[in-house]
Image (cartoon, rainbow, N blue to C red):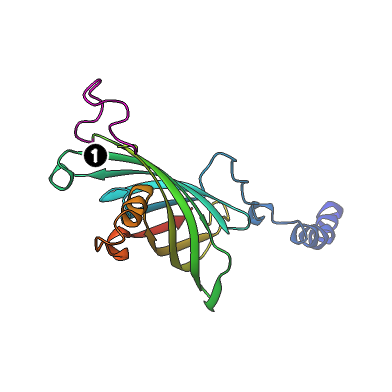
Amino acid sequence: MKRFLLAVLLLPGLGAHAATLPDTSAAAVPPAPRKWWRPTHLLLQTGGGLGQVAAGAGYALAKNRLETDVLLGYVPRKYAGSTLSVASLKVMYSPYRLQVAPKVQVLPLTVGAYVSYAHGIINDGVRGQYPRDYYWFSRNTRVGPLLGGRVTYLAPPLAATGQPRRLSAYYELGTNDLYIASFFGNLKGGLGFGKILTLALGVKADF
């Protein structure tokens, strides 16, 4: 009987102690740090002299104001005389951004440059076909400036990692070294400025 009474007296204290134990199962897991080699975003675009369709990945630096992208583009044979694959590197800088809504940002100005290499150009790679100085310009490498803008939607962060997500649509106007040289070499020939410009439209997603 004494043992029974002792157990009854101890039960409330044990219950109160159990109620104060922390619930470790519900503890928040801190987000995993991003590995240094992992890209911050993926992108897909059309046009811009980098392929009818081009896809790639890139890194955001300097508080997302500076971005470097690596793309691989494709041009079908019916548009270029031969099937082309285009590898390119872009560097873009966004000096400022406008918060037009709680989850919408506008980057009214992005400036940068690119370099591209096209493989598969007709008459490319035939040794001795032309003298070394036949072309003053590179047949497969282009360099040029870029100017554009972007609209960004700020999506909820990834639940698994806590990393922020941004979904963007962008445009870029560009040209290249050969187009610029042709323009200044034909100032009296009626080559309009608009004819040396290229237009790229694309989407970009952080992950």
Q: Is residue 171 magenta?
A: no
Horizontal arrangement in the rendering, residue 111 relative to residue 55 (left or right):
right
Identify residue for label 1: 84
Which residue is outermost to the front? Answer: 188
Q: Amino acid at mark 1?
A: Leu
> In which image quadrant can residue 140 be found?
top left
Q: Is residue 125 magenta?
A: yes
| Category of crowding for the residue at label 1, using alpha-carbon neighbours closer than 10 angstroms: few (below 14), some (14–19), many (at least 20) | many
Q: Taking the image as drawn, is residue 131 in sight?
A: yes
Above or below residue 94? Residue 98 is below
Which residue is outermost to the top? Answer: 128
Locate residue 46, reporting x and y percent: 29, 55
> In which image quadrant can residue 127 be found?
top left
For the residue pair 140 and 120, the one nearer the viewer reads as 140
For the residue pair 34 and 188, the one nearer the viewer reads as 188
- State the SS at label 1: strand
Q: Quadrant of the N terminus?
A: bottom right
Q: Residue at x 30, y 37 (%)?
A: 139
Which residue is outermost to the bottom? Answer: 101
Q: Taking the image as drawn, is residue 101 in sight?
A: no
Locate residue 69, reporting x and y percent: 46, 48
Q: Residue at x 59, y 41 (%)?
A: 35
> In which image quadrant can residue 141 be found?
top left
For the residue pair 174 and 188, the one nearer the viewer reads as 188
The range drawn in magenta is: 121-137
Locate residue 86, reporting x and y percent: 31, 41
Above or below residue 137? Residue 165 is below
Above or below residue 48? Residue 115 is above
Q: How many marks?
A: 1
Q: Residue at x 28, y 50 (%)?
A: 53
For the residue pair 66 and 121, the one nearer the viewer reads as 121
Q: Residue at x 22, y 23 (%)?
A: 126
